[in-house]
Amino acid sequence: MIFSLYIINKAGGLIYQKDFNEGLLRLDSNEYLVLAGIFHGIHAITSKISPLAGLGGLEVLETDTFYLQCFQTLTGIKFLLITEPHQPNVDTLMRKVYELYADFVMKNPFYQVEMPIRCDLFDINKTIEYIILLKLIMEDKNQNDLLKPPVKRSMEVLDKHFFKKSVLLSAAIVPLSLIASFRKICSADVLKNNISIVPMDSLFKKVLLKPRISPYDLSKLTKRSSEFIKEHKISIIPYVLELNYDFWNSDDILSAILPENLLESIPCSFAQVGHIAHMNIREEYLPYKKIIGEVILSKNKGIRTVVNKVDIIDTTFRNFKMEVLAGENDFFVEHSESNCRFKFDFSKVYWNSRLNDERHRLIQLFQKGDAICDVFAGVGPFSIPAGKKRVIVFSNDLNPDSYKSMKENISLNKVDLFVKAYCKDGRQFIRDSVHELIEFSKQKTINVPNGKKTKSQESFPKFENILIPQVFKHFIMNLPETSIDFLDAFKGIYSGYKHLFLSTKNSLPTIHVYCFSKLSPPDDLIPRLSTSLGINLLKNNVNIHYVRKVSPNKSMYCCSFKFPEEIAFKSI
């Protein structure tokens, strides 16, 4: 960003001054004259005290907040250009200013040398910056970079004020009645972002065009755009677009501050859990984790805390250590999923928002009146949505914090009649749940209020009776690291209950086992399942569903298969 331009004659008199940023401190005319005189004196002193002969004095002054460059002509005229630090192409900018001075000031027959500059052509469009930027754009070979943020790879703490940029574009002055047609017909030339239309008055709006199009050279317009503009006599004018931090997304900002060797896979993705953004930052990015967290926090509404996992998931209680990268140190969240509300302390329980689609897929398999056994239920992301479908769920988790939150979420979502919470070891729960469901089925039905009725439903009964089945339809085992190891608990769980399956209404349950594999395809899964069950499962009898990639060399799968009779009825 260009702040100011000063031109000082050889006697130290200020003959031209212009500010290009509205946020600058405004001085009165006498103070500008004093500043010019002071710099003239400093310039003269530095030329005398230089240890090397023949040098012309101070040329560059750099501070944390501005950059000053001085160019002195052979006739003693000094040009001072003040910009933000790290402003690119300052030498080029200075050269353009001098070219404009030579063309529009020195060649003006009415201008008297060393007197204040009063040349309208030099001050065209009320700011010389328009012309400077225009010349740079016309010479810029990579015009796509114009809308990229300024770069500062040494940034350690996020400085939003650094990300300011002035970009000269072309704008079409379009009547309101033609806006829709213009955007459709000229879409190939219109700037594609949420600031492409700038209000003017009650009759016209400015439509910003892509950087490749110059207001003084319309040859790069597409044929359709060119014809439409000519037909409707639409004017194309210069427009200086002031960009700031809010314009760019998190990927743009991180691309401007991370080292060049780390730009291939910028860590912008995260799983959102309530107000928390949960990141898994790879090792090579850890030195920059704090500023990454600051960017993610600032660019995502609804996020108040950014955390990074710092340890592997505990296989017993399925929680993990995390550190706060940015924002509040608050882990208690309220999260919505599958038309249900969940409340829990994210630092004490397991929750993965990336499994939302997978949970939805499995829940779609459950029908009203089915009985489901959720062995590693967490806070209830399978169990509670299933309960809302009037599916009977026995829901278990060994983690006391998960169990506590699960019970609260069952009440919060009003599924108490259908979801029963347990806090047991997985193996013990598998064995106990079979017997508990049989006992529960002696109740025969669950009577559920049908809720408010419309006039057309007035003949419907006030209560619906949901028949309680004697056997489970599905077992869910969502503990990917060790689920397979728990399959031995199924041996003989229906021993002594074979008579329940003589009727066609009951069939052996389907087991859904979540697990990891490092192979592609995952040819190791069926042998591992078979070993744990103590029986050879046939490939055709196991559905292996890909869930997600959890690391470059490991993927998550759901293996679903019908409970084998020889295991279910095996004598213990």
Image (cartoon, helix red, strand yellow):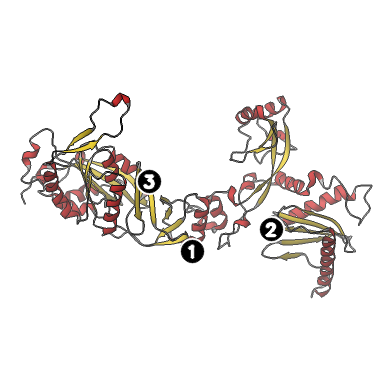
Can residue 535 be seen by looking at this rendering? no
Within 10 Å of disc 2 (Cα), the crowding (few <14, some 14-19, many 20+) is: many
Can residue 272 be seen by looking at this rendering? yes
Which of 235 and 500 lies nearest the eye of the viewer? 500
CB atoms of marks 1 and 3 within 8 Å: no
Q: Residue at x 34, y 49 (%)?
A: 342
Which quadrant does the N terminus fall into?
bottom right
Q: Which residue is mark 2?
A: 84
Going from N to C along the chain, the mark reached first, 2 or 3, is 2
Q: Position of residue 413 (x, y in %)?
A: 31, 45
Question: For the residue labelled by badge 1, is the local secondary structure a helix, a strand or a loop?
Answer: helix
Q: Which mark is residue 303?
A: none
Q: Which residue is mark 3?
A: 336
Give the Cα distance between marks 1 and 3: 33 Å
Image position of 369 with respect to 136: above or below:
above
Q: Which residue is mark 1?
A: 287
- Which residue type carries mark 2? Glu
Which of 454 and 466 lies nearest the eye of the viewer? 454
- Which residue type carries mark 1? Pro
CB atoms of marks 2 and 3 within 8 Å: no
Going from N to C along the chain, the mark reached first, 1 or 3, is 1
Query: In the rendered view, does 518 fall on the left or right side of 49?
Result: left
Q: Residue at x 6, y 41 (%)?
A: 498
Q: Position of residue 247 (x, y in %)?
A: 59, 47
Give the Cα distance between marks 2 and 1: 27 Å
Give the Cα distance between marks 2 and 3: 45 Å
Question: For the residue labelled by badge 3, is the local secondary structure a helix, a strand or a loop?
Answer: strand
Q: Position of residue 123 (x, y in %)?
A: 82, 47
Image position of 362 with respect to 75: above or below:
above
Query: In the rendered view, does 516 fall on the left or right side of 150?
Result: left
Question: For the residue labelled by badge 2, is the local secondary structure a helix, a strand or a loop?
Answer: loop
Q: Quadrant of residue 155?
A: bottom right
